[in-house]
Image (cartoon, rainbow, N blue to C red):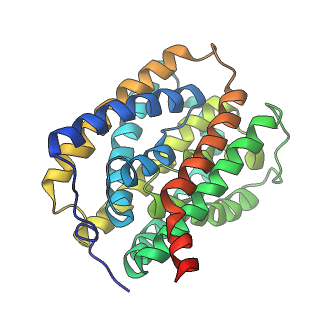
Amino acid sequence: MRGNPITDRAPVLENGRRARLAFFLSIPIGTLGGLIGLGGAEFRLPVLAGPLRYSARQAVPLNLAVSLITVVTSLLIRGWTLSYEPLSPHLPAIAALSTGAVAMAYVGATVARRISLAQLERAILTLLLLIGLALIVEGFLPAALPALLPDTVGWHVAAGILFGLGIGLVSSMLGVAGGEIIIPTLIFAYGVDVKTAGTASLLISLPTIITGLLRYQRQGAFTDRQALRDTVVPMGAGSVIGAILGGLLVGIVPAAWLKVGLGFILIYSAYRTFGHTRKKEEAA
């Protein structure tokens, strides 16, 4: 069943109120994301579909547009504060991950368009629950682990394409940058240090997000300029402010504790926002 990403559910909030909510709610999300090194897009999605009252079809491409703003900003900040030189040994893996992610981002956006709204909400719920569990597990893992993959270019490229396919699917289906999957993949599969993994994650995310956005744009997801003006712009601004605040607060609260706590919050908010689909089907 196909649906129009703009008209599945007409926005009912007064536009000025929506813009204010989008801005102020995105600041704490961006702050928490900055504290743990993520963009916070997985937490923005329940906000878009909850307090801001967008349908899942509307929320995903809007979330992807905000993700583009946060990723570009983060890349600019890292370009001023960190060197890109440590990425050199990992360029084959980064290229492979990007290739797989871009290919699946195109496919994922098409799948999200073609399935029914109920199926899309179930898929979003499942992916958000998995990300929440991954955050909890990651919070208990040691900071350094040996690379799981053999140290050969062939293994790195082949595995990177496979990992990238999963990353691209999650990115396009949820409208996220995918850092919550990319960073652990680089650390545990490739043995990349956390700072380098964060930079590499942004480089992998950028073409993935752009591919998804172009596909959604061709499907008519951004014909409502008011949604861009009243949601994407203020939410992008709030996310950038929050990310800067989070970066300044790094070290005050242990990142592991935050990941565990945010994992539980994400699971709760995802089920509260998207669990209604399952309840409706059980009642039918």
**Percent coordinates x, y for residue 269 in the rendering:** 54, 48
Q: Residue furthest bottom?
A: 1
Quarter of the figure with the N terminus: bottom left
Does residue 185 appear left or right of residue 173 in this picture? right
Q: Nearer the viewer, residue 205 or 237?
A: 237
Looking at the rendered structure, the number of numbered marks drawn on it comes to 0
Q: Nearer the viewer, residue 188 or 51?
A: 51
**Percent coordinates x, y for residue 278 in the rendering:** 56, 72
Does residue 178 appear left or right of residue 154 in this picture? left
Q: Residue at x 84, y 38 (%)?
A: 145
Q: Image quadrant of residue 197?
A: top right
Q: Residue at x 58, y 66 (%)?
A: 165
Q: In the rendered view, would you say 188 is above or below 49?
A: above
Does residue 56 appear left or right of residue 143 in this picture? left
Q: Residue at x 53, y 54 (%)?
A: 272
Q: In the rendered view, would you say 73 is above or below 8?
A: above
